[in-house]
Image (cartoon, rainbow, N blue to C red):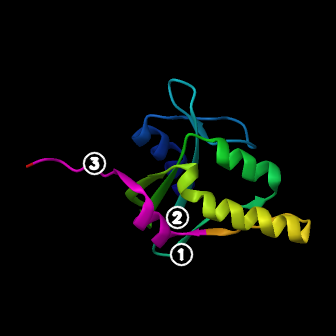
Amino acid sequence: MIIHRRLFQKPLVLDLQKLPRREGNDATDATGNEYELKTVNARLTKSFSTHHLNPTIIKKYREVTAWFFSVYEHIELSKIYRLTPAQLESFFTVWETKWKKDKKDINNPKIPLTFVEQNGHLVYPVATKP
């Protein structure tokens, strides 16, 4: 049930539609822009998983409009950050270089939560004015 809550909560908070396909980008907005969605339970780990990577997936990651990184404290959504592919390019470059050197898919490289917090734009919760 917790997994389902996370799957549905992020698109609702961000006003996105979850894409039904397993491969490819995760969500789209009303104008067709596509997004990558990542989640972390900050009580268990301090980095976001990317699954396996190869040049095709890295290309897809570079082409989305933005990435949304959701931070949960157990089952409670605490924050969502938005980063552009340009802000994540240093990761893409390292991963692409490693793939070219090793000629094999990379198993689940991570994006640190601290990087997301320091470089991302906080979109949730939205600050309210007094």
Magenta residue check for 115: yes
Rendered position, 25 above or below 99:
above
Looking at the image, tell me whether mark 1 or mark 3 is earlier in sequence order: 1
Q: Secondary structure at mark 3?
A: loop
Q: Cα distance, mark 3 to mark 2? A: 19 Å
Rendered position, 12 above or below 47:
above
Which residue ends up furthest to the top in the rendered image? 31
Magenta residue check for 71: no
| Residue at 81% from the left image edge and 57% from the top image edge | 54
Query: Where does the magenta region start and end?
Result: 111-129
* Residue on which the image places disc 3: 126
Residue 73: % across, % down: 41, 67
| Residue at 74% from the left image edge and 47% from the top image edge | 59
User: On the picture, is 95 further left or further right than 47?
Assistant: right
Q: Secondary structure at mark 2?
A: strand
Q: Cα distance, mark 2 to mark 1? A: 7 Å
Residue 16 or residue 5, whichever sits in front: 16
